[in-house]
Amino acid sequence: MYARQPDMSTNDARMLQVEMEVLLQGEAAGLVSLLQREQLSVTALKQLDQLTTRNLRSGTSSRVLLVFRSLEILSRRQADLETLISRGLTAKLLGWFEVLRDLLTSDLRRRSTPLLNIAEAFFDYFLLLAGGPLPVSQLSVLLAQLTQFCRDQELHFPLRLEAIRTINSILEALDKNHRHSLRSGRSHDHTLCEMATAVLTAGDYELQASLSEALCRLTPRKERRLRANQWFPCRDISDAFCDIRDKDFELDCRRFLNVLNSSDGDQRVYSFRCLRAFLDVTELIPPQGDQVEQFWVDFNLGSGSVSFFIDEPKGSLWASVNLAREEVTHYSVRHRQNGFRGPEVVLGVQLKTPIMHQGSRGQRVELTFDLERQAAVEEAAGRVFTLTRRRSSPRRATASSINRPLRQRVKVYRKKRKSRNTSKLKVLPLSSPSSDDGCSVIKEVRTQDWRRATLENSGPLAKFPTIQFKQVPTSRIQFRGGSERPGAPANQRRQSSGGRR
């Protein structure tokens, strides 16, 4: 532990700031050496705070990222992390986070790649910080800030999803005593109310499910009835929330959110049972296991996407396919007569970016539903793809086209099926890892010969790229129902499984 140093003179502080400015143009090792030489003094951290705030506002992202790399290196030593926390690092980090949030709500910068990279650095370091000797009072403030970030509808949607996933990873790592102390904090009730309100207004199934998970983690079962009656507008919804069991979280959370979303007067998430899903002529197999009753497709107005999960037959993971509005050139809803199954309704979605399988490429996804759902599917698809211009076709198909910059690929996330024997809480899917080639991989089954093959999709969204589907866990994947969790959260932060609260 470093001893507290006497305050520097004004000239010394100015010279230190100049030296820091030079080092911020180099490598992290130089800044680390400087901070260690200054024994992580209050003055040194103050100068670092001023420079980081200035670089954030000016958009000098490389220097901000170097600060985070330096802090991560220093935080590997428990004594250094304790010193950083005791000398006010948490407050400085949250101040920087507020500056970033203001920048990200600007229409011109909300999808800025450098800012998205910085946001990722924040989420990673928050996990590292929360896993250290962070006082509960500071942890409460951190969770409150992340909750507000998650609720901010002006922010780019993947960032909001990352915020709640970061919260769940933090909560998963806490022991029983820390969770109890957290629930006793003054801001705890307010944070819970913020999360519950976000469940009602999120407009995206995965975001709602992650928020529901956090509520369950933060609320002992004996308190849920009283709190649910305060959070939700009717008894049916609060009953469904109270029926969520840790060991059957995936199944019970689906039931809860279906009840909630179907009760919404201004419905923002439509969930329909899907009969079959295809990528061109390749059938995508629905999730298998105890935690799946139906093959659900979610139409998410809040995120402007259509999403569903598919099976990965040879492993223990599911993949989540997300068809974002920005990636759709046109769509159609049509009636089709199936000789074997009878009449059905087919939603066809044409994508800007092909999904690639080995040497072949496919850009069309077809989702089949019961004929009785035709009107509802037309309404849901129309509201999700609301920026598109519709045009009619001879087969009653409706089509739309949009002319927006290509920013987001069809995303494929991984998630783990829960085994029959585990009793752990099933944590919701987390964002994908960065991959050098920007490819995504999911599993598919060809309808002709039922051979398993790998399905890849290319093209990242800034720092929220699609992933490579590997059997071995990679960074940024949250697993369900298992117990594996990496020790270094900075680059493996959302790989944790849900533990019992």
Image (spheres, rainbow, N blue to C red):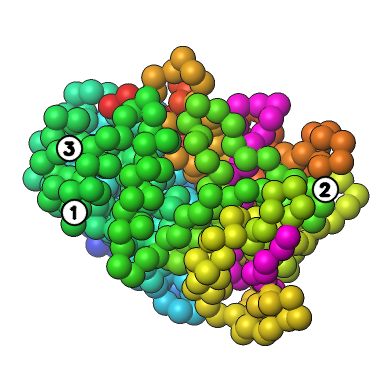
Q: Give the foreground label among 2 and 1.
A: 1
357 up-or-down from 220: above or below: below
**Which residue in the protein does label 1 denote?**
234
**Which residue in the protein does label 2 denote?**
357
Q: Amino acid at mark 3?
A: Arg
Q: Which residues are magenta?
A: 309-337
Residue 107 image position (x, y, % from top left): 45, 79
4 up-or-down from 264: above or below: above
- Asked whether the viewer can see residue 274, the reply is yes
Q: Amino acid at mark 2?
A: His
Q: Amino acid at mark 1?
A: Cys
**Which residue in the protein does label 3 denote?**
224
Quadrant of the frame with the C terminus: top left
Q: Are marks 2 and 3 in contact (CB under 8 Å)?
A: no
Cα distance in 3D space between marks 2 and 3: 46 Å
Residue 362 image position (x, y, % from top left): 80, 57
Residue at image location 31% in from the left, 29% down from the top: 245
